[in-house]
Amino acid sequence: MTPRRLALLRFRRRPAAVVALVVIALFAGVAVAAPLLAPYDPTATSWSAIRKAPSVAHWMGTDENGRDVLSRVMFGARASLLAGVVSVLIAAGIGVPAGLLAGFTGGWTDAVLSRLVDAMLACPFLILAIALTAFLGPDLTNAMIAIGVSTAPRFMRVARAATLEVAGLDYVQAAWAAGASGWRVAVRHVAPNIVPPLLVQATLALAAAIIAEASLSFLGLGQQPPAPSWGSMLNTAQRFLTQAWWLAVFPGSAIFLCVLSFNLVGDGLRDALDPRGA
Amino acid sequence: MKLGVRLAQMVPTLILVSVLVFLLQQLMPGDPAMVLAGEERGDPRVVAQIRSELWLDRSVPEQYLHWVGNVLQGDFGYSWRTRQKVSDLITQKLPVTAQLATMAFLISLLIGIPTGVMAAVKRNKVWDYIANAIGLAGLSMPTFWLGILLILLFSVRLGWLPPSGYVPLTEDIRQSLVTTIMPAFVLGAANAAVLMRHTRSSMLSALSQDYIRTARAKGLSKPRVLLLHALRNALIPVVTLGALELGALLSGAVLTEQVFSIPGFGKMVVDAVFNRDYPVVQGVVLVTAVLIVTLNLIADILYVLINPRLRRAA
């Protein structure tokens, strides 16, 4: 059996992870098809339906401007998932080549890159992201850049450690002995084999990035109104806690469910891809 | 590891941190001198004067050296908003966050370690599953949402606790605890989940060791074996991790302080971001980074101190 099939089998043996994967697919489907699925326009205000409790017409109630909360939660999935995916791509795009380079060349390059990573990790993740958005200016794109850059050191660490491990293996030594160039060894022989730990890291980073985007939007530094985002919806909800609990409960549940699913899939992938740990 | 070597390793990290924090300023859109000049921005003399006061007319490396020189003397510059010294602002706000973070840390220890031990002892039983599920939920719960939900329950519904505000410890200990218990729990919850997961795995590996079997074979009571033999060894890696997690607590404090309107370090940085008060943002990032580098050092030292094998070697 190929390692991939074996991993798939092991993953399927974890029902929680499989269910979580289905939940993620549902969220992704809702995000993509939001214009078709949402019962109302997420930005359409209605002065006759301000802060109405959940009802048949509005399953999740309406907000302070009479907008439909369900439609906003559906469209909010777009901001959250987009932010998660884009910032993880940015983080991996910076971190993986840097980690591969550091692990592969060693010496001064490694020393400099590793110290840089130490320095970046010394700033708490969210504070670094907040500082970056502060200087870049608050909007969703900059929030994604800030989250991506702040996450990059973690990818670099994982990629570096995996590279060091793989580079010492026999088949890599054999490739060297066969006269392959350094570039060829790095790209053809080492890179494909550091994918499993990176995949686990990416899934867990997605969960962290979604929380980070929600946090930045909650602070007013991410998605700007009136465009919907789970985090900014919770920001408004806070002002109406005594009158409208539904404004706080539904967007928050969406974040929680989405992040929980990514964490479950990440845990499942780790067990499936690393037989020693399972 | 020698303490001297470890201290020496901190130096390049701290220098790089300072360079990164300084470079943040270069990302800023627009000319700081124009912003600071405010309504007088039309007057070239005013702008030129500000520029020379802030060394903005020098080269970037010169600006950096000037800035670092000041920082080393404890001078982080002045807030653009209130004209107060950034160092004064930080010393005012830091104790508030420190109180919150300490309480949160204690709460997370009180929850995380016993549940972790319980989960390991009752491995693959109902207790283990419950503890794991709660742990995973704790990790996936956004801090600010947990805060909002608790306010809904304890302040709006039950009216037991105030939804916001802060009373300093020095003013009234009771009131101070009443105002901070909910935020501290919120802040500590995610940390408790992390500690629980690590205590569980660390405890599981300790329980499979030979010395545990020996202790049991000697006829020692179960609690005695668990607490004196297994837990003592299992906690060694957890202590290090606990110190490292203090960094995450500082991140979480930003959100918690926002939710509960607590005038601490985190609230200050968010307000500074909205006011485009860049020196304050830089000061906060630098101080937190230095704090965390120091905490990492303390974690390393603690690790050596509580681990008998390493203690003898050092």
Image (cartoon, coloured by chain):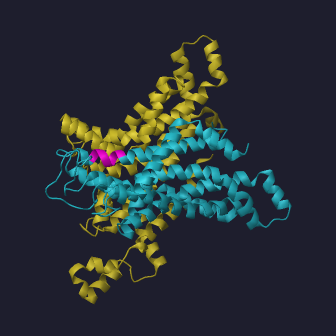
The residue furthest bottom is B44
Q: Is A201 one of the magenta-colored residues?
A: no
Task: Quadrant for residue A77, please give it.
Answer: bottom left
Q: Is residue A250 above or below residue B33?
A: above
Whether residue B99 can be seen here = no
Q: Position of residue B186 (x, y in %)?
A: 34, 41
Of A131 and A133, nearer the camera is A133
Q: Which residue is located at x 48 percent, y 47 percent?
A: A262
Q: Position of residue A46 (x, y in %)?
A: 18, 59
Image quadrant containing the C terminus of chain A: top right
Chain A shade in the render: cyan
Outermost residue on the left side: it is A48
The quarter of the displayed image where residue A274 is located: top right
- Is residue A251 a member of the stretch shown in magenta? yes
Which SS does the magenta portion mostly show?
helix
* Left or right position of B175 against A1: left
| Number of numbered discs overlaid on the protein picture | 0
Residue A194 in percent (x, y) is at 66, 54
B245 shown above or below B109: below
Which region shows up in magenta? Answer: A248-253
Along the viewing direction, whichever of B176 and B78 lies nearer the viewer: B176
Residue A83 in the image, given as x and y percentages of width and height: 43, 59
**What shade has chain B been given?**
yellow
In this rendered view, identify the residue nearer to me: A155 or A195. A195
| Residue B258 is at least partly visible in this image | yes
Residue depicted at 48% across the width and 49% down the height? A25
Residue at (59, 58) in percent of width and height: A156
The image quadrant where one finds the N terminus of chain A is top right
